[in-house]
Amino acid sequence: MTPNDTDNPRSPQTVAPLNRPQPIVESHDLFRGHNEILISHDGAIYRMKITRQGKLILNK
């Protein structure tokens, strides 16, 4: 029995193209001195926060 593409979680449809690097956005450019921002995505508002330990938390 031969596995098909749907059996493979890393099928070619799910792998990012190697010739297109993902853009990098610096967190200080997003937060601009604040420790919390609101992000609108697909009609919903998300809250991204920098914790005391310097980690990022995203909540809907």
Image (cartoon, grey):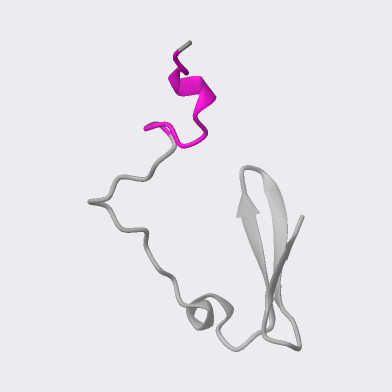
* x and y percentages locating residue 40 in the rendered image: 63, 54
Relative horizontal placement of residue 40, taking residue 10 as reference (left or right):
right
Relative horizontal placement of residue 12, taking residue 4 as reference (left or right):
left
> In the image, is residue 19 above or below residue 10?
below
Quarter holding the C terminus is: bottom right
Pick whichever, 39 or 48, lies toward us.
48
| Residue at screen point 37% across, 62% down | 23
Pick whichever, 34 or 49, lies toward us.
49
Pick whichever, 24 or 5, lies toward us.
5
* x and y percentages locating residue 13 in the rendered image: 40, 31
The answer to which quarter of the image holds residue 15 is: top left
The answer to which quarter of the image holds residue 37 is: bottom right
Residue 9 painted magenta: yes
The answer to which quarter of the image holds residue 12 is: top left
Q: How many marks?
A: 0
* x and y percentages locating residue 20 in the rendered image: 27, 52
| Residue at screen point 52% across, 83% down | 28
Farthest residue toward the front? Answer: 1
| Residue at screen point 37% across, 45% down | 16
> In the image, is residue 27 above or below residue 42?
below
Farthest residue toward the left? Answer: 19
> In the image, is residue 3 above or below residue 58?
above
Q: Main secondary structure of the magenta part?
A: loop
- Tell me the magenta residue range: 2-13
Farthest residue toward the top? Answer: 1
